[in-house]
Image: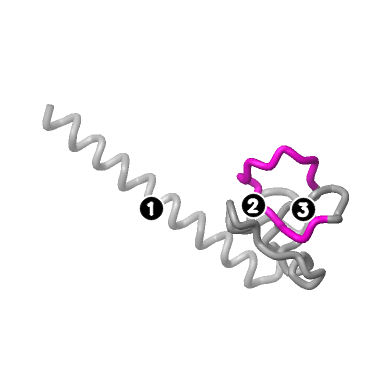
Amino acid sequence: MVVIGVVCLILSLIIVVIGITNDARRARLVREGKATYFVRIAASGKGKVYHSFRCGTNTVCRTLPLAEAQLKGYRACATCGGSGTIRLLDGSSC
């Protein structure tokens, strides 16, 4: 039983280290100008809110860089907070 606990602890630590490394890599890509934060807005563009990719909205959405959404006067969704997802500037995930 103790062995299983130790193995689970070691695996948890490995997962945390991988997550921290991945976050640092993504932040570096943003600093270097190779990536940016993207959010979703309703495809019609008539709304005033931008959403995170995990938000539960059921509308058809389009992807927009966070800075551009803010410049156009959109505000963060009250439900999801509008946290952006880091993507490469060509729109692919990193």
Q: Is residue 6 above or below residue 28?
A: above
- Nearer the observer, 19 or 74: 74
Looking at numbered disc 2 in the image, what kind of residue is underneath it?
Answer: Ser
Using the image, tell me which numbered label, if any, was put on residue 52: 2
Q: In this view, does 84 lie above or below 57?
A: below
For disc 3, the neighbor class at 10 Å (few under 14, some 14 to 19, many from 20) is many
Residue behind mark 1:
17
Q: Is mark 3 on a helix, strand or loop?
A: strand
Looking at numbered disc 3 in the image, what kind of residue is underneath it?
Answer: Ile
The residue at the point 72 percent across, 38 percent down is 58
Relative to 70, 3 lies left or right: left
Q: Main secondary structure of the magenta part?
A: loop
The residue at the point 58 percent across, 60 percent down is 26
Q: Position of residue 79 (x, y in %)?
A: 58, 52
Quarter of the rendering containing residue 34: bottom right
For disc 2, the neighbor class at 10 Å (few under 14, some 14 to 19, many from 20) is many
| Magenta residue span | 47-61
Q: Where is residue 1 in the image (x, y as percent from the top left)?
A: 12, 26
Looking at numbered disc 1 in the image, what kind of residue is underneath it?
Answer: Val
Mark before the other along the chain sequence, 2 or 1: 1
Mark before the other along the chain sequence, 3 or 1: 1
The answer for how far apart the CA atoms under marks 3 and 2 are is: 9 Å
The answer for how far apart the CA atoms under marks 3 and 1 are is: 33 Å
The answer for how far apart the CA atoms under marks 2 and 1 are is: 25 Å
The residue at the point 55 percent across, 60 percent down is 25
